[in-house]
Image (cartoon, rainbow, N blue to C red):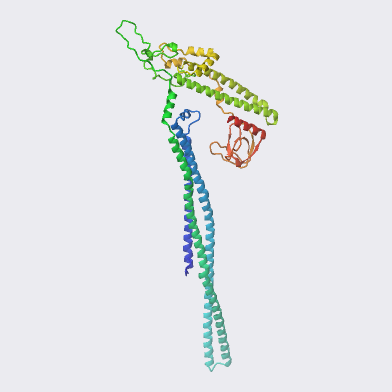
């Protein structure tokens, strides 16, 4: 670019095309990286959705399956895949900020710099062309004046040689010739001066101005090339930075896989489906040659009713239903789980008792929280009406009483089962005896209803006949609904927010709403518009006004719920 050129215009045209091509390459690379970030975001979203899709649903049968080490390992894999997706989001964010954002700003600066350099080049080219035109004009003027001086000299000489011409005419011709010679000399001096000036300008143009402009264009182009190279390095480095974390996620998946214990899972299956029945004894030979009534030996499958175990014998309705091939009920079973084998029934009843006790504790926690809130309202009437929580407190008291009755009922059945299991511990015997003492009538009634059938078999028909009928109430539905969070303040929307994601809520600028949960450090605040509309909005989009007393109550509720 520094070499002298006699066709600067052509060189500027070539350079202009090349530098524009360089900018196009840079913009093409920006578009490539932008599409890569979109792919990363889409991939991360699909991974998160995949992980969420296979997460166990709360309060479902799937949650119970995660007792096994293999399913726990699968759950760990799902959680790690969620973190794995997060790293692809990091790749997208870093590429957007470090590459596309930076290069977009650089392209704008590059276009301005390029425009300035070519403007200077065009200006220098126009200046030298103007100097050349001035030189040409001076040269033509000098040439014209020389020709005029020659003609005037020739005319003077002609007049001077002619004897018929007067002396005055000869003098006049001589003066005209002298004038033309002077004009030619002046034109010569001007042409010489203009030529010297042009040569100086031309030298500066080709050896200073144009090389400087070409040098600046060259440096600009080299910076562009270096910048795109650095961006490509950053492109690789952004990926490389997340490799250790992705590797850690994969290591955790491997660790979870190695934690699978097939022996432990097998033992859980054994414990889960252990029936509690004793194995049957040997079948005695029945001699039909004897003229006597057919009987079944006491060492056969039958057991005495006095032992509290179902009798099993061949023939009749019991055929094909011998332990352990007992037919199970289809559909919903009886409330006391009497359709299950003893050990399974005991586990189900114990599980039900534990669930009811948790429900009782939950109701008591709510009652305590409302009691504290009532005390706050009594001390600070401006915060709310203390009488407004009395109705809810009464409902909670009724719910607790109903749940306690349910617990008592299931504990009675549990005591009965533990009393019938052959391998009871002393502690279970004492506990069972305590329950029997407290619930004698209930237990006796259950025991009477659950006598074995005449043939001693444990059948589906028997379970259906002994199922206890409990009237349905609205209590269960009422208890399943989560109590809405109390209001802890108000807020004003500073900007309009379109809540398009799950769990968010749309707000309009200037709208006043209620705050029900503070920002916990994740940048989101939970608000409520009315009883049916609540969700999260970015904390920076709202101005929050918290009520101190209500906030204290809210915190106490949070601690209790935890």
Query: x, y percentage for residue 193?
Result: 55, 78
Residue drawn at x 51%, y 12% as measured from the top left: 444
Compared across the picture, whether 553 is left or right of 235 comes to: right
Residue 352 visible from this viewpoint: yes
Residue 120 location (% of width, % of height)? 54, 65
- Which of the two residues, 497 or 372, is positioned nearer the viewer here? 372
| Outermost residue, front side | 426
**In the image, is residue 48 above or below residue 286?**
below
Q: Residue furthest bottom?
A: 163
Q: Please, is residue 138 above or below residue 225 in the view? A: below
User: Quarter of the image holding residue 374?
Assistant: top right
Q: Is residue 26 visible?
A: no
Task: Choose between 182 and 282: the one closer to the eye.
Answer: 282
Q: Is residue 548 left or right of residue 188?
A: right
Q: Nearer the viewer, residue 308 or 468?
A: 308
Residue at x 51%, y 53% (from the top left corner)? 103
| Quadrant into which the C terminus falls | top right
Residue 408 image point, x, y percent: 55, 18
Hey, which residue is sitting farthest left in the picture? Answer: 289
Residue 195: image x %, image y %?
Answer: 53, 76
- Residue at image coords 43%, 26%: 269
Pick whichever, 361 or 105, lies toward us: 361
- Please give the count of numbered marks on the rendered protein: 0
């Amino acid at each position: 670019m520094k070499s002298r050129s006699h066709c600067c215009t052509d060189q500027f045209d070539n350079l202009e095309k090349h530098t524009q091509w360089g900018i196009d390459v840079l913009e093409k690379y920006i578009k490539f990286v932008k599409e890569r970030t979109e792919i990363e975001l889409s991939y991360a979203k699909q991974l998160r959705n995949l992980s969420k899709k296979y997460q166990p649903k709360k309060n479902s049968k799937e949650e119970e399956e995660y007792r096994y080490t293999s399913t726990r390992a699968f759950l760990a894999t799902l959680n790690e895949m969620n973190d794995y997706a997060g790293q692809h989001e990091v790749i997208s964010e870093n590429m957007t900020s470090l590459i596309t954002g930076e290069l977009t700003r650089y392209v704008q600066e590059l276009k301005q710099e390029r425009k300035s350099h070519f403007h200077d080049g065009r200006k220098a080219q126009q200046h030298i062309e103007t100097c050349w035109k001035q030189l040409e004009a001076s040269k033509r003027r000098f040439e014209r004046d020389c020709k005029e001086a020659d003609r005037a000299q020739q005319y003077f000489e002609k007049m001077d040689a002619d004897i018929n011409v007067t002396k005055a005419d000869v003098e006049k011709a001589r003066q005209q010739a002298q004038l033309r010679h002077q004009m030619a000399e002046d034109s010569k001096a001007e042409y010489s001066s203009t030529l010297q000036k042009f040569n100086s300008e031309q030298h500066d143009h080709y050896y200073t101005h144009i090389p400087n402009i070409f040098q600046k264009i060259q440096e600009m182009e080299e910076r562009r090339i270096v910048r795109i190279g650095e961006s490509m390095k950053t492109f690789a480095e952004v990926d490389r930075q997340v490799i250790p974390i992705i590797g850690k996620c994969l290591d955790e998946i491997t660790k979870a896989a190695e934690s699978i214990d097939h022996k432990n899972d097998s033992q859980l299956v054994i414990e889960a489906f252990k029936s509690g029945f004793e194995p049957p004894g040997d079948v005695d030979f029945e001699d039909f040659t004897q003229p006597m009534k057919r009987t079944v030996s006491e060492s056969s499958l039958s057991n005495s009713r006095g032992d509290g175990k179902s009798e099993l014998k061949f023939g009749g309705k019991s055929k094909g239903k011998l332990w352990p091939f007992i037919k199970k009920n289809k559909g919903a079973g009886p409330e006391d789980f009497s359709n299950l084998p003893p050990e399974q029934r005991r586990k189900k009843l114990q599980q039900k008792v534990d669930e009811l006790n948790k429900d009782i504790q939950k109701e008591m926690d709510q009652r305590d929280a409302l009691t504290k809130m009532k005390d706050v309202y009594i001390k600070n009437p401006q915060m709310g009406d203390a009488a407004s929580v009395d109705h809810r407190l009464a409902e909670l008291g009724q719910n607790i009483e109903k749940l306690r009755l349910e617990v008592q009922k299931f504990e009675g059945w549990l005591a009965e089962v533990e009393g019938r299991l052959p391998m009871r511990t002393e502690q279970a015997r004492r506990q069972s005896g305590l329950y029997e003492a407290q619930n004698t009538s209930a237990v006796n009634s259950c025991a009477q209803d659950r006598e074995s059938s005449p043939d001693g078999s444990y059948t589906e028909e028997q379970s259906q006949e002994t199922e206890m009928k409990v009237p349905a109430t609205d209590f269960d539905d009422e208890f399943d609904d989560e109590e809405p969070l109390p209001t802890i303040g108000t807020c004003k929307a500073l900007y309009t927010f379109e809540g398009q994601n799950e769990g968010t809520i749309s707000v309009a600028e200037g709208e006043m709403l209620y705050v029900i949960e503070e920002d916990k450090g994740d940048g989101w605040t939970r608000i409520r518009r009315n009883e049916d509309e609540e969700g999260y909005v970015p904390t920076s989009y709202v101005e929050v006004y918290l009520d101190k007393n209500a906030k204290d109550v809210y915190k106490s509720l949070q601690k209790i719920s935890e």
